[in-house]
Amino acid sequence: MTGKIAIIGDGDSIMVFRAAGVATFPAENEVKAREVLRKVAKDYQIIFLTEELAKPLTEFLKRFDEEPYPVILSVPSKNGSTGHGTELLKSAMERALGVDILFNN
């Protein structure tokens, strides 16, 4: 599993990652994304998930917080950022450090 990176998202959003050598897994909706995530979570250390798919899967993604791997990161899609990825990062930092050191809101 060392250093393996994947992305799950709509076809257009993940295409650029494929060009960079990242394993790509297309998913057109959150049901398909959940199914793909269950399969790839065992084999990849870092998994990017587009924000449109990550937001409806928030509760499902919490199960991955207890283990060191895989790290699941929400990234903007071809449609731009919804702010969901930033909120997840802020929440994770507050849990880990007890304070918001990046955003100071």
Image (cartoon, rainbow, N blue to C red):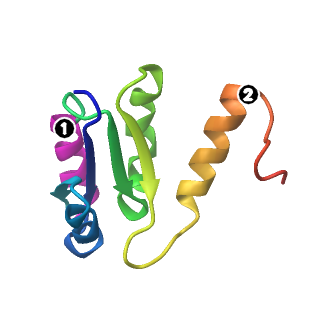
The one of 41 and 16 positioned closer to us in this rendering: 16
Query: Which percent across, then down, holds residue 44?
Result: 25, 35
For image coordinates 25% across by 45% down, the residue present is 34
Q: Is residue 84 left or right of residue 93?
A: left
Badge 2 element: helix
Query: Residue 81 bears which disc, if any?
Result: none
Instruction: Please provide percent x and percent y for residue 104.
Output: 84, 51
Residue 48 screen position, x and y as percent: 36, 50
User: Which span of residues is magenta-colored?
Assistant: 28-40
Is the stretch drawn in magenta largely helix, strand or loop? Answer: helix
Whether residue 68 is in magenta: the answer is no
Name the mark on residue 97.
2
Residue shown at the point (19%, 38%) measured from the top left: 40
Q: Amino acid at mark 2?
A: Leu
Which quadrant of the figure contains the N terminus? top left
Task: Look at label 1 and name its amino acid.
Answer: Val
Q: Secondary structure at mark 1?
A: helix
Q: Earlier in the sequence, mark 1 or mark 2?
A: 1
Pointer 1: what residue?
40
Q: Is residue 38 above or below residue 1?
A: below
